[in-house]
Image: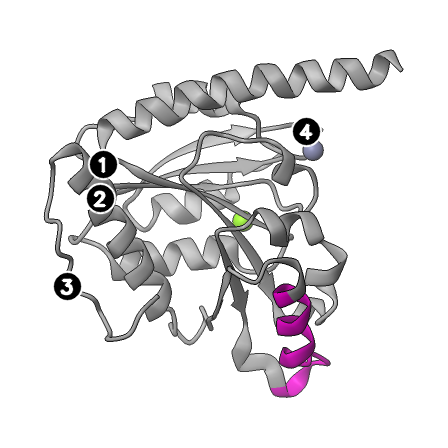
Amino acid sequence: MSEIRIVQNVLKHNDEIAAMNRQRLRDAGVFWIDLIGSPGCGKTSLLETTLRRLHGRIQIGIIAGDLATDRDAKRIQACGAKVVQINTGKGCHLDANQVRHALDEIDLTGLDLLIIENVGNLICPVGFDLGQDAKVGMFSVCQGDDKAAKHPHLVRAADLLILNKTDLLQHVRFHPVTFRDDVEKLNPDVAIMELSVTESRVDPWLDWLISKTAKAQAQTGNGSPEPTPLIQGGI
Ligand code: MG
Ligand code: ZN
């Protein structure tokens, strides 16, 4: 019984720090995302492509969560982005306090967008609010079409879902209809963006980022309230 109480206290404390993080980024007019996906679904590759494609258009900062290495951080740095690494050791998720300390290392002035690459794990990152504006859940067709149904908490909590590696659809056992039906039952409001990061088919994602970033800036009186989309009809 006491174990349950401890967990609740940890989460309560986490939520208090998350609220401080939220206010801090809101004051700075920065839109920020908690990107949650399993190992190998393409999170870091998506960030690399995003940084290259949006270079010179919006200023992006990255916080990279990783158990043991700085390999993701190095890849991101090579794209010219500001990146702060959080090594979690045995920890399988990021919490709001770790992110608070990482934020101390970032100059939020002049930043438009902050993306947190969470530890590759579809389970407990969902339960830890970091203060982000949006949680983005990421899957790939290589993982199988049952993963939405098997990870209902992520699907319910997500503000946006990404389905990556669609260029490999013909080679793997993945029925898009099954995946979509499962998502629809769990979270009818969430959009699913089908991307192929390796083929650089990511325009809906870039448009979404540009639009959300512009809105966050408009709320604090910075930036242009009317972004020019990369493509028409983006979400
Ligand atoms: Mg990664
Ligand atoms: Zn965890």
Gap in Å between the C-alphas at discs 1 and 2? 5 Å
Q: Name the amino acid type tagged 1.
A: Leu
> Label for residue 91?
4
Residue pictured at 89% horizontal, 15% vertical: 1
Gap in Å between the C-alphas at discs 2 and 3? 16 Å
Gap in Å between the C-alphas at discs 4 and 3? 40 Å
Q: Which residue is mark 3?
A: 228
Q: Element type at marker 2? A: loop
Q: Name the amino acid type tagged 2.
A: Gln
Q: Which residue is mark 1?
A: 111
Q: Element type at marker 3? A: loop
Q: Element type at marker 4? A: loop
Q: Is residue 81 above or below residue 189?
A: above
Residue 3 in percent (x, y) is at: 84, 16
| Residues at discs 4 and 3 in contact (Cβ within 8 Å) | no
Q: Name the amino acid type tagged 4.
A: Gly
- Write down the region rendered in magenta: 170-184
The disc, 4 or 1, on the residue closer to the chain's N-terminal end is 4
